[in-house]
Image: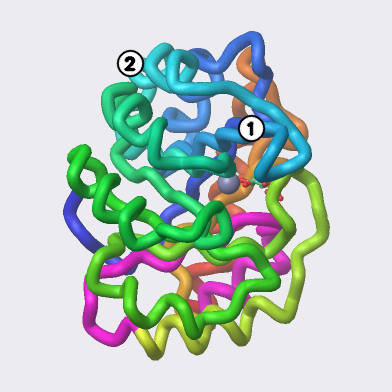
Amino acid sequence: MTFSRSIKIAPSILSADFANFGMECRAIEAQGADWVHVDVMDGHFVPNLTFGPATCAAIRPHIKGVMDVHLMIAPVDPYIEAYAKAGADVISAHLEAGPHIHRTLQAIRGAGAKAGLALNPGTGLEDVAYLLDMVDLVCVMTVNPGFGGQKFIASQVEKVRRLRAMIGDRPIHIEIDGGVTVDTAPLVAAAGADVLVAGSAVFKGGSVENPGPYGDNIRAIRAAAEAAA
Ligand code: DX5
Ligand code: ZN
């Protein structure tokens, strides 16, 4: 994974056919996805459940590029090694998931993955300052985590702009997760984001049998973001 601030589209397989993850991952990559975003939910940190490390390991051989695992779980630390072993390139943990995010980020890098720090919409940037030198990515949630298809929370655009200034020259990605569409992608790209997660906006209208719409959706979001970046 070489660092670049170019726009990357990361479809979230939360909006994919859960009976067909392997085919869905192949389809979105063939249709132009840069990263594959994998949402892990525990029914405790967030009010929804998805899947765990065994599913991530099963998906891995179907992804050529970056496997970006977003852990919406608490506690996090006991499971980091399992997600690293499953082949995650990036593992993001939530600042709100426990009292020891510093230790968690150390553990993610220690396990050989890139470390991501995810922030809920209600979380400020004050606590991020002392973590910046130990992260490879900050994920700004633009919805409350737990479900796909929610409305983009516009107050987060200003947070992205402030975060971009804090990051300066450090090789840290800014990822946006939640409610990304052709209409909202330009707002966050202009504010400094480079990784755009999109679930419903990528998968709408398509399927593994008819993946063309995935490509149309990815190209439309990318074009809108690049024009604003
Ligand atoms: C929400 C997840 C997101 C979600 C985004 O908790 O972390 O990755 O799938 O879905 P959309 O793009 O539909 O808002
Ligand atoms: Zn996510």
Q: Which mark is residue 61?
A: 2
From this view, report whether residue 119 is shown above or below residue 11: below
Q: Are marks 2 and 1 in contact (CB under 8 Å)?
A: no
Q: Is residue 24 left or right of residue 88?
A: right
Instruction: Give the class, few, some or many, for how many residues have Cα within 10 Å of label 2's Cα (few <14, many ≥20).
Output: few
Q: Secondary structure at mark 1?
A: loop
Residue receiving disc 1: 42
Q: Is residue 15 above or below residue 107?
A: above
- Residue located 37% across and 29% down the image: 83
Q: Give the camera-side residue of 20 and 111.
A: 111
Q: Measured along the vertical axis of the image, is residue 145 above or below residue 147? A: below
Residue at 66% over, 58% down: 180
Q: Tell whether 150 sits left or right of 156.
A: right
Q: In what element is the residue under mark 2?
A: helix
What residue range appears in magenta? 167-190
Asked whether 183 falls inside the magenta stretch, the response is yes
> Residue 198: x, y in percent?
62, 48
Residue appearing at x 58%, y 39% in the figure: 12
Q: Is residue 224 left or right of residue 59?
A: right
Q: In the picture, residue 67 is in which quadrant?
A: top left
Q: Residue at x 47, y 71 (%)?
A: 193
